[in-house]
Image: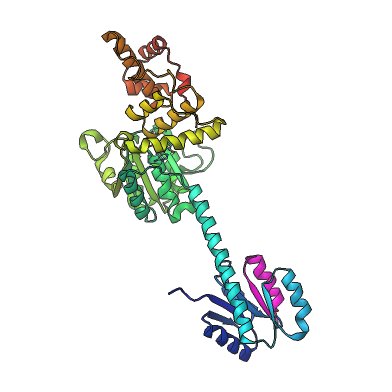
Amino acid sequence: MATPMPVALIDDDRDLRRATAQTLELAGFSVSAYDGAKAALAELTADFAGPVVTDIRMPEIDGLQLFATLKGMDGDLPVILMTGHGDIPMAVQAIQDGAYDFIAKPFAADRLVQSVRRAGEKRQLVLENRMLRRAAEDAQETLPLIGQTPAMENLRKILRHIADTDVDVLVAGETGSGKEVVAQILHQWSHRRKGNFVALNCGALPETVIESELFGHEAGAFTGAQKRRMGRIEHASGGTLFLDEIESMPLATQVKMLRVLEMREITPLGTNEVRPVDLRVVAAAKIDLGDPEVRGDFREDLYYRLNVVTISIPPLRERREDIPLLFSHFAARAAERFRRDVPELSENVRHHLATHAWPGNVRELSHYAERVVLGVEGGAATPLPSQPTGGTLPERLERYEAEIIRDALAANDGDVRRTIEALGIPRKTFYDKLQRHGINRGGYASRK
Ligand SMILES: Nc1ncnc2c1ncn2[C@@H]1O[C@H](COP(=O)(O)OP(=O)(O)OP(=O)(O)O)[C@@H](O)[C@H]1O
Ligand SMILES: [Mg+2]
């Protein structure tokens, strides 16, 4: 059964208030009766779900003032005025100002009930629309997690379950697989979205600054610390702390981080002060920290502390059915951004989508979609197996090598250091090969 529609009734006359309340209760409304505007205003909120019925003549705050106050609070709240004979001109003015209706006293019960019913229906519609709009706004804020494979459906289900709990989460997945998207969703889908989402790349910070970044410092805590600075952990208090590339956190910091996770408090550098923090920690790792072989000297105790819940995002090659969906999404987005049309997919592009291993996962796919839209890919740019596969062994190896280098560049946004690392070759060899294969590194730079 639907919950009865609430009605707020305000009348200073006790007998009339009781009689009117009874009329409305009998008609199926749930009435909150108040003997004056003050009492009503103390309880009514902007999202009050039903109409307000008020007498005009009341001591202190009269019905018209109450109407004006309510209108300021929520312009869509329907207010019905009950007026004595002499107040009709005022009531007409109030209607022009947006009051829902007025009813001249004495009135027939029917007349009141009908007006309240209509006002209630209108109210319900307004609130429904409001809710839909808010939901739409929320949805827009949230980054999309595209994918219809069972793995992705499952991932979304888990995220829905744990997002609004305070449990710490370890997100594992290859580069570009969506770890940060997952972390942001955990934040957005929780009450913590009102706080900060603080992302900290543990691999990118030099060891010398990571601690003052994390914990903050007092002025003069060390050379160069001129001003007091709030650390990132404290900044994330009330929100979410995202520790990206946790596997590259320096050992000394790991010890301190473990303490933060256990005690939920920090001590800024240069102080003895202990400050409590209200945190949800989401950590991301590209490697399997659960495997002692792989974990290396990453602290086992920190791993176990982080690993309350581990979410593993499968690599794109293990959910190939999502590739077309993701590609269309990124191509449409790129087309809009670059003011181009989404091109017809060439045989080359189709083939690439269907056969490529996507070592850079979703990020690589998104950059590929951008290049296709920009027309720098999709023609003969990438040697594909659909092109002549023949030739001598050295020729074929050459082609294969060029493809591997292009893939590595794409997976690493054209970042030379990371590409070289991924390929495991000396810098000079890398540049020599670029030149020999006529590969333009610039074409792979991130276009975020
Ligand atoms: N399921 C998905 N739906 C839509 N976009 C996605 C999805 N997964 C990843 N992306 C997009 O792909 C890009 C890479 O994702 P993200 O930054 O989350 O990867 P990551 O796992 O953190 O990578 P890295 O380890 O290299 O930091 C982002 O632009 C992100 O928006
Ligand atoms: Mg990331």
Image point 60% across, 73% down: which residue? 118
Q: Which residues are magenta?
A: 60-81
Whether 90 is drawn above or below 430: the answer is below
Q: Is residue 426 left or right of residue 370?
A: left
> On screen, 29 above or below 323?
below
Quarter of the rendering occupied by the N terminus: bottom left
Front-lying residue, 433 or 418: 433
Query: Is residue 268 among what the camera can see?
Result: no
Residue 223 vs residue 320: left or right? right
Residue 68 pos. (x, y %): 69, 70
Q: In this orientation, which residue lies closer to the viewer: 99 or 138?
A: 99
Tell me residue 156's x, y (percent).
36, 49
Residue 103 position within the rendered picture, expressed as x and y whole percent measured from the top left: 68, 81
Q: Is residue 71 magenta?
A: yes
x 52%, y 43%: residue? 228
Nearer to the camera, 39 or 329 = 329
Judge whether residue 370 is colored magenta.
no
Left or right placement of residue 240 versus residue 49 in this view: left
